């Protein structure tokens, strides 16, 4: 009798857990309501409404960082002008310096007072590293990024928040932790992923992994829409 | 004074590109087209190889310490040499390459990385892209083809003759402009995701 009760409990937990996953992971939401368009007026008044925005961006390296900086510059009205705090994840110093130069330019030009916090993430995988080397560095990154992501996540709760990612590998780990915190700690996080401009006809590995997890998945070339019904295309954004 | 910028990727060096540009016929061509300065970003940790290539193709070189361009004079390990009346200046890496391009550069010869392509196009400079076909996952070719198809740039491989032809084209053909990449729909998407 005890055994049966125990089994029932376990089954209940598993079922609840699965339901919870389905509720959280965007893949299971389909595209219904994918474009709840803001009225034009909203964008005008948006600086006021997103005053509390907690933004999290991750700077990859080289081309990824370049594209991210352009996204931030092009869409600064939503991303930074109304932000309460900007969390910047990075894994190499070049990206950090580039970001600081750019953000200084932008805030000078628009006379903004920005609150920025920097978080150093370990690289998930170096370009061209061996399989075993990759596995080890990925595992290390997973563990270390758990706490970093948690800290960022905590400052998001109860406020409008947005996580903007565009690769490379470390983004998968960040997204994974964000979604796990979402599932187990009931703290929603919203992820927008923008696939690299370099990807014209095939998703990157990071893109493929993030496809089910990102709340919005945006590609910059229309060919990528064919096999990816959840993807959205707005032309070249960077 | 007309200047050319040659740029490799920040993370992956591209010696074949530098070697092609440093060829005597190419330098001669540049001089004929009125370019008197060749600026090379050769990439991290590539300084000694760059100097070897210069010695191999240009021969003995004398060094100048200052160029009179602030961004470059402050850059790490800037090297300047003279060959056939063209001033060749090499540096490792520049964080703010946009300022350099905007103020001092007329033509960019670049690897086919999206970052470098966009830098040149957004600043409305003539752009020749050299595809690095030694990279394992070669999406450089695809991206170069896409942009070349829209007549935004000239795409070639690391080959002297191809570069000479492309230089002629850059002088005689007019390329398209990339325009503004701000998209209102995408801005709304970001906004909606953030507040919902």
Image: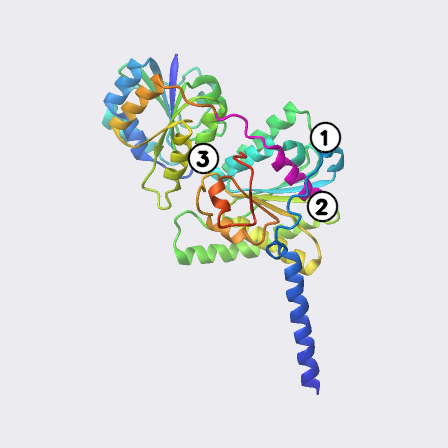
Residue matched to label 1: A44
| Quarter of the figure with the N terminus of chain A | bottom right
**Residue B155 to residue B1: above or below:** below
Question: Along the horizontal axis of the image, is A96 left or right of A159?
Answer: left
| Nearer the camera: disc 3 or disc 1 | 1
| Nearer the camera: disc 2 or disc 3 | 2
Distance, label 2 to label 3, CA atoms, is 32 Å
* Magenta region, main secondary structure: helix
Instruction: Give the mark nearer the N terminus: 2 vs 3.
Output: 3
**Is residue A113 on the magenta stretch?**
no
**Residue A157 to residue B127: above or below:** below
Residue matched to label 2: B196
Distance, label 2 to label 1, CA atoms, is 17 Å
Q: Is residue B60 visible?
A: no
Query: Relative to the observer, which residue lies in front, A62 or A194?
Result: A194
- Which element carries disc 3, helix, strand or loop? helix
Q: Point out residue A151 in the picture as x, y percentages from the top left corner.
A: 66, 50
Distance, label 3 to label 1, CA atoms, is 32 Å
Q: Which mark is residue B114?
A: 3
């Amino acid at each position: 009798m005890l055994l049966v009760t125990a089994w029932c409990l376990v089954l209940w937990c598993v079922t609840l857990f699965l339901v919870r996953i389905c509720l959280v992971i965007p893949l299971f939401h389909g595209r219904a309501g994918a474009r709840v368009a803001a009225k034009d007026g909203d964008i005008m008044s948006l600086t006021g409404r997103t005053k509390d925005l907690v933004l999290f961006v991750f700077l990859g390296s080289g081309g990824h960082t370049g594209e991210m900086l352009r996204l931030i510059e092009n869409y600064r009205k939503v991303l930074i002008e109304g932000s309460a705090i900007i969390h910047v994840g990075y894994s190499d110093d070049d990206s950090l310096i580039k970001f600081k130069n750019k953000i200084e330019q932008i805030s000078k030009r628009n006379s903004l007072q920005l609150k920025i916090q920097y978080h150093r993430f370990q690289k998930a995988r170096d370009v061209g590293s061996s399989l075993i080397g990759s596995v080890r560095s990925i595992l290390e990154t997973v563990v270390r990024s758990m706490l970093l992501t948690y800290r960022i996540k905590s400052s998001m709760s109860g406020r409008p928040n947005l996580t903007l990612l565009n690769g490379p590998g470390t983004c998968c780990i960040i997204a994974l932790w964000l979604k796990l915190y979402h599932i187990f700690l009931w703290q929603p996080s919203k992820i927008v992923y923008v696939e690299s401009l370099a990807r014209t006809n095939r998703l990157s590995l990071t893109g493929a992994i993030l496809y089910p997890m990102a709340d919005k998945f945006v590609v910059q070339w229309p060919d990528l829409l064919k096999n990816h019904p959840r993807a959205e295309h707005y032309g070249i954004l960077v | 004074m007309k200047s050319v910028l040659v740029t490799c990727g920040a993370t992956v060096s591209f010696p074949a590109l530098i070697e092609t540009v440093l060829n005597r016929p190419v330098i001669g061509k540049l001089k004929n087209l009125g370019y008197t300065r060749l600026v090379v970003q050769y990439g991290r940790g590539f300084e000694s190889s760059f100097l070897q290539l210069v010695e191999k193709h240009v021969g003995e070189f004398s060094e100048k310490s200052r160029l009179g361009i602030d961004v470059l004079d402050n850059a790490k390990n800037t090297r300047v040499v003279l060959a056939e009346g063209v001033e060749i200046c090499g540096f490792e890496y520049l964080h703010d390459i946009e300022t350099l391009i905007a103020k001092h550069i007329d033509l960019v010869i670049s690897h086919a990385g999206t970052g470098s392509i966009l830098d040149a196009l957004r600043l409305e400079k003539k752009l020749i892209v050299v595809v690095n076909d030694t990279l394992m996952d070669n999406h450089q070719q695809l991206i170069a083809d896409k942009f070349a198809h829209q007549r935004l740039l000239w795409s070639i491989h690391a080959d002297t003759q191809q570069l000479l032809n492309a230089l002629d084209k850059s002088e005689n053909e007019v390329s398209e402009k990339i325009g503004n990449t701000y998209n209102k729909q995408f801005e709304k998407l970001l906004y909606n995701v953030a507040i919902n």
